[in-house]
Amino acid sequence: MATEKQGVILVGHGGIPRDCPQELVTKLKRLEALRRAAKQPPSVEEIDLDQKIRRWPRTQATDPYQSGLEAVGAVLRPYLDGVLFALAYNEFCTPTLEEAVADVIRQGATSITVLTTMFTPGGSHSEIEIPEILDHLRPHYPDVELRYAWPFDLQLIAKTLAEQLRRSS
């Protein structure tokens, strides 16, 4: 029997690069809203715009959010006991969750746990979109266990926030 190889993917929201033209983002959001209202799949135009924004060149200065998530990932990684690890972004940045899952599977993962930095209940990304993506991916990877570490324990979140408050005082 093969040994299970664990993977962890940390999903952040994703940020818009500061030098990305705002009209691209406005147009993408308008197309997304129209599609959702009509309950249709994304159009070629929407997909192209999404990819253009996600693949926009980034630096720490133009996308401090990406740099911030990378920093969180770098601090988290040593706690993961050598499991395969990747970052993903819900929107505006690459890799997507779908891309990160495929990459970790290519590296040999047979079990993947997805974490998110979006821990507040009620968020559409964390409560709806990420589970939908995982549900969509499961039939494509029937031999890989895809788990989602959600919802967060609000007592632990509250303790972390209280500790941060105490340290900042």
Image: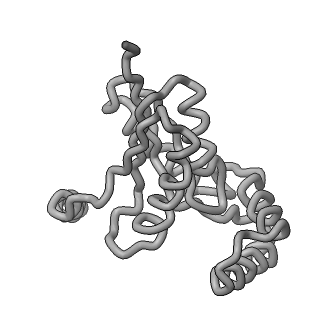
| Quadrant of the image containing the C terminus | bottom left
Reply above or below: 136 against 45.
Answer: above
Report if residue 169 is visible in the image.
no
Toward the viewer: 141 or 130? 141
Residue 63 % position (x, y): 64, 57
> What residue lies at 41% left-to-right and 54% top-to-bottom?
116
**Left or right side of 13 for 43:** right
Report if residue 40 is visible in the image.
yes
Toward the viewer: 10 or 168? 10
Toward the viewer: 87 or 5? 5
Toward the viewer: 16 or 139? 139
Residue 111 % position (x, y): 41, 33
Seen as rendered, the residue at the extreme top is 1
> What residue lies at 69% left-to-right and 49% top-to-bottom?
59
Number of numbered discs visible in the structure rendering: 0
Residue 154 % position (x, y): 20, 64
**Left or right side of 159 for 85:** right
> What residue lies at 65% left-to-right and 80% top-to-bottom?
39
**Left or right side of 5 for 95:** right
Q: Which scheme is used to colour this image of the protein?
A: one colour
Q: Quadrant of residue 43?
A: bottom right
| Quadrant of the image containing the N terminus | top left
Q: Quadrant of residue 27?
A: bottom right
